[in-house]
Image (cartoon, grey):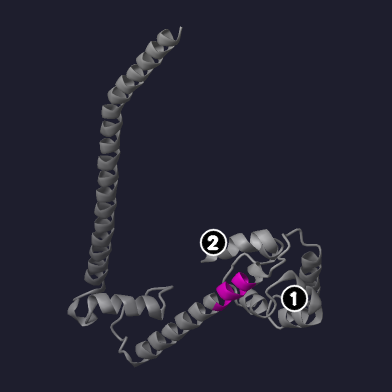
Amino acid sequence: MQKRFKDILRSYLPEVLNFFSQLDSKVLLELLSKFPSKQAIIKNEEQVIQLLTSFRNWNEQKAKAFVNAIKRSIGRKDKHQVAQTIILSITQQLKQIKEQIQSIDDQIKQMMEQFDQTNFPDIPGMGDTTKATIISEVGDIEKFESKEKFVSYIKHKTQGNIEKREQSAEKDILQLSDKSDKVDREVQEEIPRANIKWQKAKASDNSHSEEIS
């Protein structure tokens, strides 16, 4: 979805990509959900600037620079508002996805607050989502006699998952290789037949030419 979003912005509002590196940015989604076209942004210049400056890292100078860039946009014209409709649709979908993710994160946080983390290893940078994932895989952490055994189990589990993915990838490669070999055989078998057909057709043409002469 984001690739399609980027492609259509590159065609109709390429300047947007100079100001937003993250296409699921809250600022961008709020902006385009209300002003999904060049015309809408220019027509509502003051509201656009007001919206942008309501977010952190967006001062009035930057907001005005954005609007001015849109005014000079080299993007394609959206005569029938097709691009506008697509941009609005994708923006709304991305907003819904972000809201769903946030809702899930909130639920996980609430669950983790009720969970006894006394014996959970204190690992820097590990958030509630990662902890919840580990708990769902491991179960009762108290069954491990030490942190070292717990870490060893996680490494073993991770390595097992990696090996499964590698085996799956190897299987896919082998299947593709088999298909490629089959195609090669079919091509090799077809070449002599095609050559015979060509020779017969050539002989027929020569015979026909002799009859005419």
Q: Main secondary structure of the magenta part?
A: helix
**Which amino acid type is shown beneath numbered disc 2?**
Lys
- Please, what secondary structure does the residue beneath circle 2 have? helix
Which residue sits furthest bottom? 114
Dot 1 alpha-carbon crowd within 10 angstroms: few under 14, some 14 to 19, many 20 or more? some
Residue position for label 2:
3
Percent across and percent down for residue 98 are 51, 78
Q: Residue at x 26, y 28 (%)?
A: 189
Percent across and percent down for residue 80 are 69, 68
Dot 2 alpha-carbon crowd within 10 angstroms: few under 14, some 14 to 19, many 20 or more? few
Q: Earlier in the sequence, mark 1 or mark 2?
A: 2
- Please, what secondary structure does the residue beneath circle 1 have? helix
Q: Quadrant of residue 34?
A: bottom right
Asked whether 27 or 9 is in front, the reply is: 9
**Which amino acid type is shown beneath numbered disc 1?**
Ala
Residue position for label 1:
40
Q: Judge whether 88 appears above or below 155 on screen.
A: below
Percent across and percent down for residue 45 are 80, 78
Tell me the magenta residue range. 85-92
Q: Judge whether 165 appears above or below 31 on screen.
A: above
Percent across and percent down for residue 71 are 81, 67
Q: Judge whether 65 appears above or below 54 on screen.
A: above
Q: Residue at x 50, y 83 (%)?
A: 99
Q: Residue at x 78, y 65 (%)?
A: 69
Q: Residue at x 28, y 25 (%)?
A: 193
Residue 192 relative to residue 8: left or right:
left
Examine the rendering and report whether any part of residue 63 can be seen: no
Residue 198 relative to residue 3: left or right:
left
